[in-house]
Image (cartoon, helix red, strand yellow):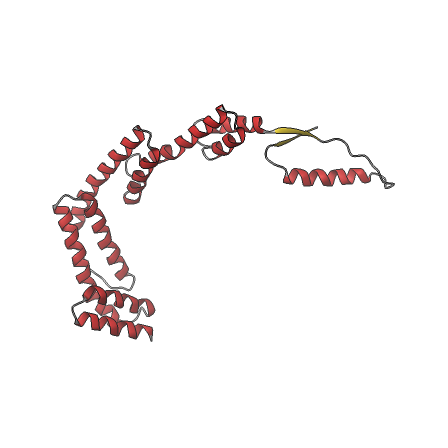
Amino acid sequence: SGTKKMTKKAIAFEQQGMYVEASAYYLLALERKNTNIDAAMGLKRTGQLVLDDYLTDFFKSHSAKDYKSSVYGYLKAIDWQKNARIYNVSLDIPHYYMTYYNEDLSVFLAQLYEDATSYLDKEEFHLGVIKLDEILKLKADYKDVAELKSYAVLEPLYRKANQALEIKKYRKAYSLFGRTISYKDSEELRAYALKEAQYPIAMLPFENGTKVVNAHKAFESQFLNLFINNKSTFIKIID
């Protein structure tokens, strides 16, 4: 079976001291059959060696105060540990590594936050959003980042909508304000843009050109229903 073939390859790699490749094949074997004991034991041996390498790289970054590399290096180790845990293989990370990680994360988040607010102060909103998104991925409840992201996304749209309004591009303004509807006075301005963008159409009464009594009324009703259900947002029917 596939799992036996993967296990055989993993053992061959392990015997040659190629534990990175071996661990990958042990994982493949377990993906095909999660009760493969030989693969689980092999992953325990080789997977721990791979994890130790990740932790060594992390500690080097921590010691060098390379906070970004440190943070992402630790998360890489955690992801590897989680992959093994899926198959009930426990790989060990000493607790003090988490302490180092939290120290470096605190500094790195502060750096990202400073960069983000600097971009927003310069109204470089797209660059600010990139930094804010990175913070949110690392710590979703960090300071006022969620509010800042909302501002960074909505403010440029709101400004574009107002610019469209100023040059009487009412349909464009209506569309843009629809994307910022809960921001500032967007709802009121959207309503104004719609009012200015609409053009009225008067429906004249239908005349009966047949010999059937009230045939025009039935046709008029059907036509109005069809027209109303399919009309553009920017068409306003008047009596």
Query: Foreground: 124 or 102?
Result: 124
Residue 41 point in image, percent of width and height: 22, 69
Q: In this view, does 88 lie above or below 146?
A: below
Residue pictured at 21% horizontal, 40% vertical: 108
Q: Residue at x 77, y 40 (%)?
A: 218
* In the rendered image, the vertical position of residue 150 relative to residue 101, given as above or below: above
Q: In this view, does 165 lie to the left or right of 134?
A: right
Q: In this view, does 228 lie to the left or right of 28?
A: right
Does residue 146 appear anywhere in the picture? no
Q: What's the residue at 32%, 41% (across, down)? A: 133
Furthest residue toward left: 63
Residue 43 x, y percent position in the rendering: 23, 66
Q: In which quarter of the image is the C terminus?
A: top right
Quadrant in the picture for the N terminus = bottom left
Q: Residue furthest front?
A: 167
Q: Where is residue 25 in the image (x, y as percent from the top left)?
A: 26, 67
| Residue farthest toward the right in the current orientation of the protein | 211
Query: Residue 82's image quarter?
Result: bottom left
Residue 138 visible at all: yes
Q: x%, y% of residue 157?
A: 42, 32
At 25% from the left and 68% from the top, the residue drawn is 40
Task: Tell me which corner region of the image, top left, top right, bottom left or bottom right, holds residue 9.
Answer: bottom left
Decide which of 229, 78 is in the foreground and name it: 229
Direction from residue 56 to residue 187 in the image, left or right: right
Q: Identify whether 110 is placed above or below 24.
A: above
